[in-house]
Amino acid sequence: MYPNLIVELKARNITQKEMAERIGISETSFCRKMRGCKDFRLKEALLISRELNPCTVEYLFAEKTEKN
């Protein structure tokens, strides 16, 4: 659902479980949001962006893959 986010997590060797822990949600919830079953809250998106600095929210959550 979020190809740029997937690329950035893989590039940093961060698992979905690790990112979920970093932003304070369950791994199950994070996985559902990554599949598009639920939406990320703004606070969660901002925390992910901070963790993956210097990536912006717009870049990470774009629907198509973009070059950073």
Image (tube, helix red, strand yellow):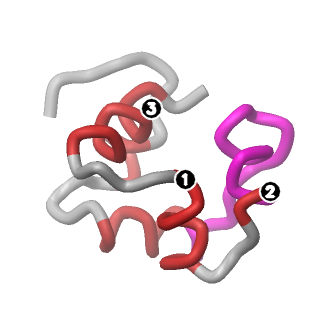
| In this view, 21 is above or below 67 | below
Gap between marks 2 and 1 measured at Cα: 9 Å
Q: Judge whether residue 37 is colored magenta.
A: yes
The amino acid pointed to by label 2 is Thr
Look at mark 2 in the image and give the residue it sits on. 28
Magenta residues (range): 29-44
Q: Judge whether residue 4 is colored magenta.
A: no
Residue at point 32%, 39% (across, down): 10
List the single residue furthest toward the top: 64
| In this view, 55 is above or below 58 | below
What secondary structure is marked by label 3?
A: loop
Q: Quadrant of residue 40?
A: bottom right
* Along the viewing direction, whichever of 60 and 58 lies nearer the viewer: 60
Look at mark 3 in the image and give the residue it sits on. 62
Verify CB contact (< 8 Å) between mark 3 and mark 1: no
Which quarter of the figure is the N terminus placed in? Answer: top right
Q: Is residue 36 left or right of residue 2?
A: right
Q: Is residue 32 left or right of residue 61?
A: right
Percent coordinates x, y for residue 42 in the rendering: 60, 67
The amino acid pointed to by label 3 is Ala
Look at mark 1 in the image and give the residue it sits on. 16
Verify CB contact (< 8 Å) between mark 2 and mark 1: no
The amino acid pointed to by label 1 is Gln
What secondary structure is marked by label 1?
A: helix
What secondary structure is marked by label 2?
A: helix
Q: Quadrant of residue 48?
A: bottom left
Percent coordinates x, y for residue 45 in the rendering: 52, 63
Which quarter of the figure is the C terminus placed in? Answer: top left
